[in-house]
Image: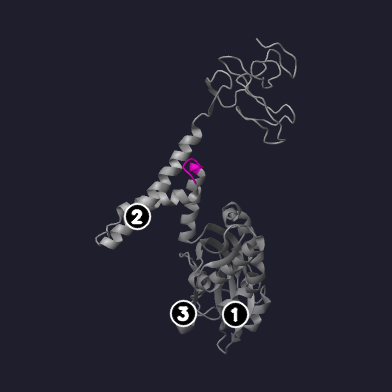
Amino acid sequence: MGFLKKQMLSVIEWKDASNDIIVYRFTLPAGQEIMNSSTLVVRESQVAVFVHKGEIADVFGPGTYKLATENIPFLTKMLSLSTKGESRIKAEVYFVNTKRFIGQKWGTQNPIMMRDVDFGHIRLRGYGTFAFKVEDPTKFMRECFGTNPVYRVADLVTQYKSTLVQILTDAIGESKLSALDLAANYKELSKIVEANSKEEFAPLGLKLSNFVIENLSLPDDVEKMLDERTKMGVIGDKIGTYTQYKAANAMGDAAKNPSGNNLAGLGIGLGAGAQLGEVFANSVATAKDSRKPVTIQCVKCGATIPGKSKFCPECGATQALSCPKCGEPISKGSKFCVNCGEKLEIGADVCKKCGKPLAPDAKFCKHCGTKVK
């Protein structure tokens, strides 16, 4: 009966019902052994590895195999022929899961230091997901697994997550991208990490099949400054400079400050508030004044006209006065030219033809000879 019980193990297989086991060591039922002519079933995304006396004997891909010395030569090394005619296979069987393990999390445990063209030295934090698979089961068994009965995803991810962050840090540094341009290059940086990971993971029999950057963020204080800079870009220069904008914000913060119970603090607060209020009021007044139309008075009739008018809409008089010698513009009532020192004879009228000043009681223009009406 003992001999018959050993013959009962006819099928060797692993029905994987988990999502986190990479390697599973096949456990023999009590009182049973792997016998000659047993059947080995390897499902898709699995590989069966036979280990004999601490060495990998053979690897079986997906399929169904009849374990017999006639068609599998390596089994002759593992058979122990007894006097009773038993053919027991003295070996351990490991099933390696070769599917993609997706949705693995990565993140920066410490900030990444980088030199930025816009902000100087800054610190980045990031997180995302990645996927991996066992590419070479033999290498993986020799380098990573050992003889544990079960090897899970968490055992691997904990060890090599920092390696991915290191590869990403090198990719960001070598790209020389500014912090503001990183978001537009997540996909390109991910491809670089996948390509550079081969040097680290291939010797272990692993392959990084996907790497996703979900976010790379700046420190909170830097992000607040960026938000204020964006607000100023939207507002423009309608209420003054950035300093005046900050002064207006400080007024609001001072009004909300409940700690004004001591006289010294109250006096300082009132003084600062008054000064800030004056700065803000002046900036708004300046902005309003800059929007008012500029006007001048006609050099002949005194009517109020637009500042850039060349002729008066009331009397038609030319508004441009110039020195008859050098042609430099002069103001009404000037006795000498500020450019060349020419003595000017400027009365109330100018010549309607050439625009030059007329001498008092002149009947003809001395510059062009036009008769004065």
Task: Please report contact status of discs 1 and 2: CB closer than 8 Å, yes or no.
Answer: no
Q: Is residue 101 visible?
A: no
Q: Is residue 232 visible?
A: yes
**Quadrant in which the N terminus is drawn:** bottom left
- Between the residue at mark 1 and the residue at mark 2, the CA separation in whole angstroms equals 85 Å
The 10 Å Cα crowd at callout 2, few under 14, some 14 to 19, many 20 or more, is: few
- Residue denoted by label 2: 271
**Magenta stretch in the rendered image:** 234-240
What is the three-letter code of the residue carrying label 1? Val
Task: Please report contact status of discs 3 and 1: CB closer than 8 Å, yes or no.
Answer: no
- Residue denoted by label 1: 51
> Relative to 217, is 204 on the left or the right?
right
- Between the residue at mark 3 and the residue at mark 1, the CA separation in whole angstroms equals 24 Å
Residue 73, how many percent across, how many down?
68, 77
Relative height, residue 75 to residue 247 (above, below):
below
Circle 1 — which element?
strand
Disc number for residue 5: 3
Compare marks 3 and 1 and give the one earlier in the sequence: 3
Mark 3 or 1, closer to the camera:
1
Q: Closer to the camera, 308 or 69?
A: 308
Mark 1 or 2, closer to the camera:
2
Circle 2 — which element?
helix
**What type of secondary structure mainly makes up the magenta span?**
loop
Question: Colour scheme used in the picture?
Answer: one colour
